Amino acid sequence: MSETVTAASDVGLLQTDKADTSTKFRAEEITDLPLADYRNYQSLLDLVPGSTPAEFQNAEMDTPARALQTTINGTNPNNNSTRVDGATNQFTWLPHHTLYVAPAETIESVNVSTSSFEADQGLAGGAAIAVTTKSGTNQFSGSGFAFYADERLGAQNFFAKRNGEEELPTSHHIDGGTLGGPIITNKLFFFGAFEGQYRRTAGEATNSVPTEALRRGDFSNAFNNDGTLQVIYDPLTGDEDGRGRTAYPDNRIPPDRLDPIAQRVLGFYPLPNLPGDSANYFRQFTNTFDRNQYDLKINWNRSSSHQLWGKVGVMDSDVSNLHKLGFEDQGGGLGKTETWVATVGQTLTLSPTLVLDSTFGYSLLDQFGYGPDFGVNYGLDVLGIPGTNGPDIRHSGFPELVTGFTVVGPTETFFYYERYDPSWSFSTNVTKLAGKHQLKLGGSIDRQHLNHWQPEVGQAGRGYLEFSGNLSALRDGPQAPNVYNTFASFLTGMTSNAQKSLQWETMTTREWRFGLYLNDRWQVSDRLTLSMGVRWEYFPLVQRADRGVERLDLRTMEVLLGGVGDTPWDVDLETRATDFAPRFGAAYRMNEDTVVRAGYGLTYNPLPFARPLRGFYPLTVANTFVSLNSWQPLGTLADGIPEFSGPDRLEGRVPLPPTTTMRTPDPDNIHRGYIQSWNVAIERRLPLSISLTTAYVGTKTTRGFADRELNVSPGDGDGGRLYVDELDRTASTLLWGGITRSNYHSLQVTLDRPFKGGLFLKGAYTYGKALNMADQDGWVGLSFNSDSHYHRNYAPAGFDRRHNFQIGYVYMLPFARDARPSIVSALVRDWQINGTFAAYTGTPFTIAGSNSALNQRGDQQTADQVGELRYLGPSADEPLYDVSAWENITARYGNSGRNSVYGPGRWNYNMSLFRTFALNQRMRLQLRLEGFNITNRIHWNNPPTGWRNVGNANFMRIDSTGPARNFRLGLRLTF
C-alpha cells in the first residue's frame, strides 16, 4: 500500500464534546512541517496557544534525547506530562525532560491538552501530552529517509562572521527507515523503525582572558566604560575592615607579590585575539553527537473483542561537546547514554457499552559522563593546590578558579556522573456508556527509582576557589570593586571562598505516585455537553533504597536520618492522602457553526521529590569555607581547601558541620501545592473549512516548591550571616517547601484548517502575562530571601512573552494535478511547500549590581535605576538600552527589580519544498529542501547579566545570537 494523505471533512471540525483547550497533530503534519535540528516533534508545540517557544535544555551529553522545554499557560515546565502509548515518559532527575523522544517517523498522532483537563488526565499541571505511535496493518508499508546538512548549506553565525573567523566544517546526518505489516493476516502485526543521527557541529565562544599587561600585574590601563581608571589597592595596608588602604604605585602590583600558583594557572590561559580587556578571545571547536534509536511494536488481535500490543524503544548515544577554555586540545569529554522504554497494553470490549483498557510501562536510563580534564588531578598534582581533587579518580579534573575572567576548564558541576534510573507505570480505565452518559473510572500507579553518583551539590569534587574584589579595593572608597579588583586578588593568591564536594554515599531515591478518578461526560441535549469529574492523587514520601530521607533539625543543627536508630522513617514529614481535584467543563453548541465552551480544573503539583531531595548531607558532603571578614582573605592558594570527610558512622542523628551546605524539607510546608486552570472559549466555523477559536485562559499556582535561604546576611558578608554568632555556621542553609505563587492571564486565538483540498493550516496567537516568584520548582532558589526584600520575588516570569504569534502550513501545489502526461506536467506537478512562521516579543531579565561593597548574602543585588529607560535596540556595537539609566549602588540594595526590563523579540520563518515522484503504483520518492531561518534574520539573545553589571565596559552589550540560516537536504521513500 502506498502512503496516502488523508483529507479531512468538516465533520468534527468544531470541538463540541469537551471543554479543555487542546491541539492535535497527525502523522502527516509531523513528518511534513519543518522540524529543526533533530527532527524533534516537540518543536510543533510552538503552534499550541499558551506555549512559549520550545527550547533545548541542559547539555547534549547530559540529555542526548534532546527533549525540548516549553512553559504552558504560565506554569513551570516541570508541570508538563508526556505519555507515550499510555505510559509515563519522564526523566526522573530532570522532570522537565521526556526520557525518550519518539522519532517523528514513528508517531501516529500527538494530542496536547493545556487547560481544564478531564479527570482522566493526571500528573500534569501545564500540558498533558499524549503521543500515539504507529502500528502495523494488513498491508506492508514503510519509509526510508536520509537527511543531510553541513556548513555549506547554511550562513555563518553573526559574531563568527563579524570576527573574521573561518567557519569550521559541520555535518548532520539523519538516516533511517520504518517498516510495518502483517505477521498473521488480521491477527498479528508489527511496526519497526530505526533512526541514526550523526552530527559534527562547529561551536564557538567569546571569552574574556587577561591581557599580557594584566598578567604582569599592570593595571595602569584598567579603564572602566565611564573613562575612569579602576584603582587597585594593596590589601596588606590599611585597617582590617578594608579602610585606609593605599593603592599600588602606578596601579601596578610588584613582581615579588605575584603568587607562583596563580602564575601556573595563567599558563592555561591563552592570550587575547580580540581587542579590549573583556570579550577579547574568540574560539571555535567541533562537537560530536552520535545517536541511534530502535523501535519495535507488536499488535495482536486475540479476538474481535480483545486487542493486545507491546512496544520497545532503545536509544544509544555518545556525545562529546564540553570544549573548555585551556583544554582546547583535550577534546570535549564523553557522555554515554542508553535508554530503554517498554510498554504493553490491552483493550478489552466486555460489551457494546463497556470497555476496559490497561497499560504497563517500564523505562531505564543508564549513563555516565566526564569532562575534558578527567583523569588528571590538575589541582592537586599540577597546580599544587592542597585539598583539591581526591583519592577517587571521579574527583579528578581542573578546579574552578574564579579569577574575574572566564574560568579555565569546566565550570559545570554536573560531572563526573553515573546514573541508573529504572521506573514503572501502570494505568487502567473502564469506560461505560449509559444512555446519555459516558462514565469513565480508572487509576494509575507510578514507581520511580534513582541511583546516582554525582557530587554536584556545591562545586563538585574538583574544588572551587574564589577571589573577592574586596581584597584589592578600598572600603567606602569612591569606586565599587569590579573585575579588575577580583583579578588583582587572584594574582596575589588571596582566596576569599573555597568549596568542594565529596560523594560520601551513592544517592538513591524510591518514590510512588497513585491516582484514581471518576468522570462523567453527559450529553444533556443536542446542544449541551457537560463533563464533571474528580481525581484523587496520593504521593507517599520519597525514601532512600535502605532508609528514609533526611531532615535538618534547625534547633540542634543535627541531620535526622529516616529509619536509622530511633528516628522514624518519615522524619516527622507528613504527606496527605486527601488531595482531591475537581474538574468541570461545559460545551454549548449555539448553532451549526458556533460552540461556546467553559472549563475549570485543579491539579496537584506532580513534581518527583527525587529531584530536590536527591542527596544533600550526608550523601553528598558539600563544604564551603569563607572569611568572616569579607575584606580579609580566607587564605592563600598555597593553603588550598581544608580537608574534610563525611560522618564516620550513621546514627539516627548526625551533627551537621557548620561549613556544609544543606537543603532540608520544611515539615510545616511540605504538602503539595496545586494549579488551577480555567478557560472560556468561543469557536466559530468559517468558510474554507477553517475554525477560529477565541479564548480567555488563566492559571494560578499556589504553593510552588522552592528553596529559601535561611542563613542570610544583610551586610558584613559571611560574618553577618544569621547563624554565625549562635552556631558558628557560615554555609548555605536551604529550607525547601511550598512557598511560591504564580499567576497567568491570556487571550488566545487559534486558527485551524484540517488537511483538505491540498491545504493544512494551524495558527496560534497569545497575548498573555505571567507573574511568578521563580520560573520552576524542581531545583530553584529565590532572588530575595531576607524578610525585608522577600516581596520583590513576585515579578514577571523569566519566560514571559507578551505577544506570541505562530502559524504552520502544508500546501500541495495544484499545478497539473489532473493534466495528461506531458513534459510540462511532469515538471510542475507534485510539488509541496510547508512552513512555520513565528513572531514574538522578548523575555525579561534583571539588571545586576555589584554586591562587593554591600556584601550581603542570600539576596540578588540589583542596580539603581536613576534615569528613564531608553531602548536602543539590539546591536553588536551599542548597548541594548541607554546605560545611563542605571548606576551601581554600594550602601544599600538597588531599586531595580527582578526581571525589570525586556530583551529583544524575534521573528523567524522556516520553509520546506518537496517534490514527489511516483516510482510505481506503490512507491513514492520525495526530494526535500528544508530551510530554517531562511531570511537569515539575526536572532539576538539577551545581554549577559551577573558579573557583567553596570560597572563593566560591555554592560548591556549582546554577545551571542541564535542560529543563522541553514538548509537541510532530504530523500524520503514511502511505500
Image (cartoon, helix red, strand yellow):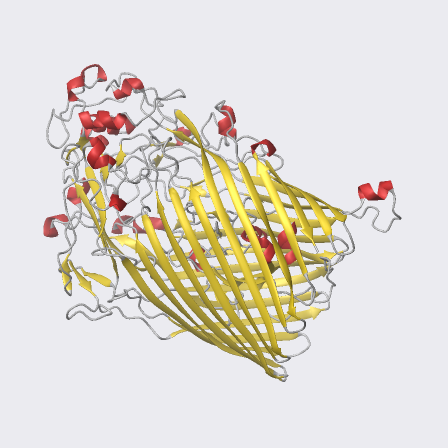
From the top left corner, tell me how far across and down residue 371 is, in percent: 34, 41
Q: Residue at x 39, y 25 (%)?
A: 281
Viewed as shown, does residue 233 lie left or right of 971? left
Judging depth in this view, the residue of 414 and 911 nearest the camera is 414
From the top left corner, tell me how far across and down residue 954 is, in percent: 39, 28
Which quadrant, please, contains the C terminus? bottom right
Name above or below for residue 68 compared with residue 558. above
Judging depth in this view, the residue of 852 and 264 nearest the camera is 264
Q: Residue at x 56, y 59 (%)?
A: 696
From the top left corner, tell me how far across and down residue 715 is, in percent: 20, 41
Judging depth in this view, the residue of 34 and 250 nearest the camera is 34
Count of numbered labels shown in the rendering: 0
Q: Residue at x 50, y 47 (%)?
A: 801
Q: Is residue 409 visible?
A: yes
Name above or below for residue 258 compared with residue 831. above
Name above or below for residue 252 compared with residue 681. above
